[in-house]
């Protein structure tokens, strides 16, 4: 009896070890029991990126990445484009955004063995136009057309770029991606004005100051036609106006006066008709004053 109980317990134990789990399909003849499935492990990335500064930019801008694991063979990728990097140390790396089309790109770091960092979205912006210099940066108010041409030097200009003069579009000429030009309009006031370049994607450059000089200037004074009791002194210069006043030794000479008088010829010439009391030479101090109060420098000449 005791022997039979022991035998039954051994048989039950053997069945428990050899029977499939509840709900499992029974093994077919000749089929071996499979080993337990291995646990899938997450791949370990070789780099840690803590910051990307700036988080977006236009071609030519430098990008700084802070993190760890950087080395001389670390490559930066923007989409399918590989970029050379400058490794500052194992925690800092830099690269320059290449000239590729604007858009959203996948930014990541990669080792030669193919191991990569986490992928980040990096927007590349359209290049912003930049004005470096204006030549000239000042023109005289009454300058002729050939002296009113201003050349812009910079970068990221396009054939359809527009030049903004105080916010309004004016006619311009495209020379290259680094050069534009325009002619200063005649119907603008003197003083400081703002110049910008606007690209077709509505990206506008910073503002560059441009100056229109309306101050009268006397270049030369020389004698002209002589008459019995008068002669002409011809003032050559620029920025003379129809109602400019000529000042002789502190005395204002009016246009159309009965005796000494001035005649406006153009913005670069005024004729002062002088009636001397005698023909001996004297030292005369001559100045031109515009209606807005702007004065030329005083010029001293010797004349009767």
Image: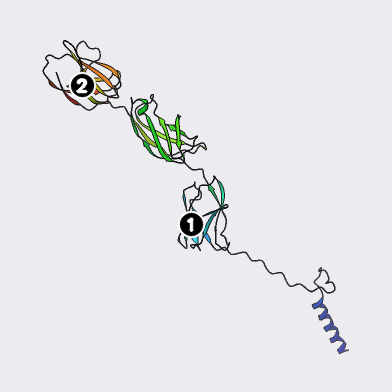
> What scheme was used to colour the molecule?
rainbow
Secondary structure at numbered mark 1: strand
At x 42%, y 40%, the residue is: 154
- Seen in the image, is 263 located left or right of residue 36? left
- In the picture, residue 182 is in which quadrant? top left
Q: Is residue 31 above or below residue 153?
A: below
| Residue 103 picture location, percent across and down | 56, 46
Q: Residues within 10 Å of mark 1 (few under 14, many from 20)?
A: many
On-image quarter of the C terminus: top left
Name the quadrant of the N terminus: bottom right
Q: Is residue 79 left or right of residue 233?
A: right
Residue sitting at x 44%, y 31%: 172
Label 2 element class? strand
Residue plotted at (57% across, 56% down): 119
* Percent coordinates x, y for residue 191 in the rendering: 34, 30
27 versus 63 height, above or below:
below
Please tell me how crowded label 2 is: few (under 14), some (14-19), or many (20+) other residues with Cα within 10 Å: few
Picture layout, residue 60 above or below residue 114: above
Residue at 87% of width from left, 87% of height from top? Answer: 4
Across and down, in percent, residue 133 comes to 38, 39
Residues 238 and 121: in front is: 238
Where in the figure is residue 301, as x and y percent of width and height? 17, 24
Number of numbered markers: 2
The mark closer to the camera, 1 or 2, is 2
> Between residues 97 and 251, which one lies in front from this camera angle?
97
Residue 195 makes an appearance in the image: yes
Question: Can you identify the residue that label 2 sits on?
Answer: 222
Residue, disc 1: 85
């Amino acid at each position: 009896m005791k022997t039979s109980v022991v035998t039954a317990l051994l048989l039950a134990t053997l069945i428990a070890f050899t029977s499939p789990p509840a709900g499992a399909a029974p093994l077919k003849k000749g089929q071996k029991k499979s080993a337990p499935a291995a646990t899938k492990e997450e791949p370990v990335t070789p780099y840690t990126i803590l910051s990307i500064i700036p988080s977006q930019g236009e071609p030519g801008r430098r990008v700084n990445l802070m993190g760890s694991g950087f080395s001389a063979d670390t490559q930066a990728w923007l989409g399918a484009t590989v970029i050379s990097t400058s490794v500052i140390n194992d925690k800092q790396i830099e690269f320059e955004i290449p000239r590729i089309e604007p858009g959203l790109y996948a930014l990541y770091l990669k080792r030669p063995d193919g191991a990569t960092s986490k992928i980040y979205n990096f927007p590349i912006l359209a290049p912003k136009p930049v004005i470096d210099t204006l030549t000239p940066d000042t023109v005289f108010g009454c300058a002729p057309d050939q002296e009113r041409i201003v050349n812009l030097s910079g970068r990221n200009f396009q054939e359809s770029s527009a030049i903004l003069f105080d916010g309004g579009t004016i006619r311009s000429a495209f020379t290259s991606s680094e050069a534009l030009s325009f002619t200063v309009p005649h119907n603008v006031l003197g003083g400081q004005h703002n110049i910008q370049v606007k690209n077709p994607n509505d990206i506008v450059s910073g503002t560059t100051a441009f100056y229109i000089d309306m101050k009268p200037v006397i270049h030369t004074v020389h004698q002209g036609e002589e008459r019995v009791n008068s002669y002409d002194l011809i003032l050559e210069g620029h920025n003379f106006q129809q109602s400019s006043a000529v000042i002789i030794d502190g005395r204002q000479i009016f246009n159309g006066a009965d005796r000494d008088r001035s005649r406006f010829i153009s913005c670069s010439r005024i004729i002062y008709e002088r009636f001397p009391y005698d023909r001996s030479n004297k030292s005369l101090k001559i100045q031109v004053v515009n209606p807005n109060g702007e004065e030329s420098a005083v010029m001293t000449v010797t004349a009767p």
